[in-house]
Image (spheres, rainbow, N blue to C red):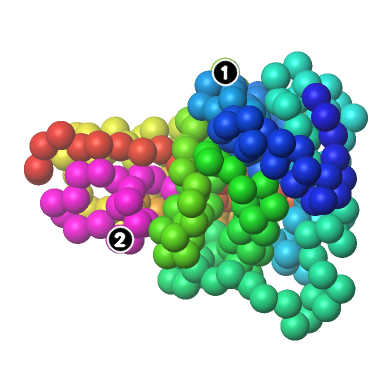
């Protein structure tokens, strides 16, 4: 696997692949790779002739009081994993390679509405930072395909909307969440959990499963289901940011007849913020 730090070197390699007619799949990451990331690499490998991964802990998607400084950085181990996963090229840029000097007056990408709901309410500016860095990376890599995990479903929806609205020539591929045997969704932030918190963290997924059962039993009193599950999580020691039943396609609040739903939750256990979701296709109207 080749590793490059400069976008000029990235471009040179990618141009040579393009001349040979190779297709390119891209997996942007912030590193500290786990099996969920490796599943993205596998899918990228299946999809295209060449696989490019990036590791960049993007400062613009962290709020001032968030964990940018503490975010786990393990580039050596990550490179070994990517090499073993058959990635062709690792792009490991410094901040200056992505952001120009004048970060005050720089151009940002806004995906309005969607970006200020759910996680966006609790992390103002987060999705602006995500959309901006993803577009910058797309412009540097120029991939045919880009892979994103379904665990970050709102992020996936924001990126799909940006690609559609800006006519970007890339196909967005989503890849299913990888879970631990307890049900806990894999995440780099799970490293912050203590042993006790880790055992409790799986209750978030259990709450999503219970809400799905209620919907499948025919209940459509969405707000009541949300409130019930929020209360169970609060009782177990979570500080819940939201527990929300939404439409899968655009994350708006569903009407009774909507059948393709997703339940999304974000909650804190101690200092760790966990997010998860569960998609459900209902088969009968109540
Ligand atoms: O999901 C992530 O790891 C990040 O938000 C992404 C997409 C790499 C942008 O920094």
| Residue range corresponding to the magenta coloring | 247-264
From the image, tell me which residue sits under label 1. Answer: 181
From the image, tell me which residue sits under label 2. Answer: 253
> Residue 90: x percent and y percent?
78, 35
Residue at horizontal 47%, vertical 37%?
174
Report the Cα–Cα distance between label 2 and label 1. 31 Å
**In the figure, is residue 97 to the left or right of 154?**
right
At mark 1, the secondary structure is: loop
> Residue 36 has which mark?
none
> Residue 63: x percent and y percent?
72, 66
Q: Is residue 190 above or below residue 239?
A: above
Nearer the observer, 156 or 49:
49
**Quadrant into which the C terminus falls:** top left
Task: Decide: few, some or many residues near mark 1? Use Cα within 10 Å; few <14, some 14-19, many ≥20.
Answer: few
Residue at horizontal 70%, vertical 19%?
85
Nearer the observer, 83 or 236:
83
At mark 2, the secondary structure is: loop
């Amino acid at each position: 696997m080749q590793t490059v730090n400069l976008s000029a070197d990235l471009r040179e390699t990618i141009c040579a692949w393009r001349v040979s007619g190779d297709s390119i799949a891209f997996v942007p990451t912030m590193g500290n790779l786990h099996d969920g990331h490796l599943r993205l690499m596998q899918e990228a490998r299946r999809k295209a002739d060449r696989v490019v991964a990036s590791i960049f802990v993007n400062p613009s998607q962290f709020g001032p009081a968030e964990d940018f400084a503490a975010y786990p950085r393990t580039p050596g181990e990550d490179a070994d994993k990517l090499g073993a996963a058959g990635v062709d090229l690792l792009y490991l840029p410094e901040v200056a390679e992505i952001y120009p000097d004048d970060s005050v007056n720089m151009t940002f990408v806004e995906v309005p509405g969607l970006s200020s709901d759910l996680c966006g309410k609790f992390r103002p500016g987060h999705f602006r930072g995500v959309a901006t860095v993803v577009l910058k990376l797309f412009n540097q890599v120029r991939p045919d395909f880009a892979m994103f995990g379904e665990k970050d479903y709102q992020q996936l929806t924001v990126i799909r909307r940006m690609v559609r609205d800006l006519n970007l020539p890339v196909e967005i591929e989503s890849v299913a969440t990888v879970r631990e045997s307890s049900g806990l969704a894999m995440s780099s932030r799970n490293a912050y959990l203590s042993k006790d918190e880790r055992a409790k963290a799986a209750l978030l997924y259990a709450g999503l499963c219970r809400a799905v059962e209620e919907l499948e039993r025919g209940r459509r009193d969405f707000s009541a289901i949300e409130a019930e599950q929020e209360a169970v999580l609060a009782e177990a020691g979570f500080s819940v940011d939201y527990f929300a039943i939404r439409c899968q396609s655009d994350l708006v609040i569903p009407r009774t007849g909507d059948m393709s739903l997703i339940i999304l939750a974000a909650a804190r256990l101690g200092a760790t913020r966990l997010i998860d979701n569960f998609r459900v296709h209902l088969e009968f109207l109540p």
